């Protein structure tokens, strides 16, 4: 029998620093924030890292940003989340920094070439 603790990652999110949330759960200002959140949950569920590793990496990213002058007003939280995700993905050899840079360039190209109001369609390469 599987318990909710082993299949539902959301209780572990309580350990994360300053996760933007309301009474229903995490909240996102932009679609990419929800995507980064979902990717993190999927990689954790697949066993690529533990919640302790995630929380430590995210805390390190937030601390480094604050030390560099981030006023920590909450509006940059998912930028730190994405930096932590990229750090773990490269540390765990799930992708190279170069592959991440190429994918970011693909996204920039896609949104710059998408008419306003239309969904962005990513074309890789």
Image (cartoon, helix red, strand yellow):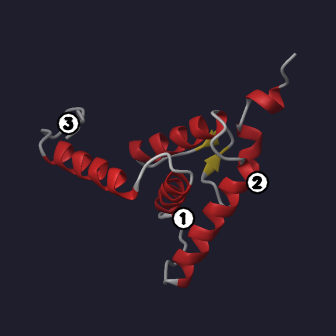
Instruction: Work out whether mark 1 precedes mark 2 in sequence or the reverse, and give the earlier one.
Output: 2
Q: Tell me the residue at 30%/47% (across/down).
A: 103
Q: Whole-Å distance between the Cαs marked 2 and 3?
A: 37 Å
Residue under pointer 3? 117
Q: Is residue 106 left or right of residue 93?
A: left
Residue ID at (52%, 75%): 65
The residue lying toward the viewer, choosing from 94 and 73, is 94
Q: Mark 1: which secondary structure?
A: loop
Q: Percent x, y for residue 33?
A: 46, 47
Q: Is residue 41 left or right of residue 53?
A: left
Q: Is residue 69 visible?
A: yes
What is the crowding at mark 3: few (fewer than 14 residues within 10 Å), some, or many (at least 20)?
few
Q: Which mark is residue 15?
A: 2
Element carrying mark 2: helix
Please report contact status of discs 1 and 2: CB closer than 8 Å, yes or no. no
Quadrant location of the C terminus?
top left
């Amino acid at each position: 029998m599987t318990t909710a603790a082993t299949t539902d990652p959301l209780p572990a999110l309580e350990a994360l620093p300053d996760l933007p949330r309301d009474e229903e759960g995490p909240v996102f200002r932009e679609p990419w924030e929800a995507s980064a959140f979902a990717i993190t949950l999927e990689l954790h569920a697949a066993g690529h890292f533990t919640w302790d590793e995630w929380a430590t990496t995210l805390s390190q990213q937030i601390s480094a940003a604050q030390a560099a002058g981030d006023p920590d007003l909450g509006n940059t939280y998912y930028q730190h989340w994405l930096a932590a995700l990229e750090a773990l993905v490269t540390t765990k050899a799930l992708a190279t920094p170069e592959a991440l840079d190429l994918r970011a360039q693909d996204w920039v190209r896609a949104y710059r070439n998408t008419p306003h109001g239309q969904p962005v369609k990513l074309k890789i390469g």
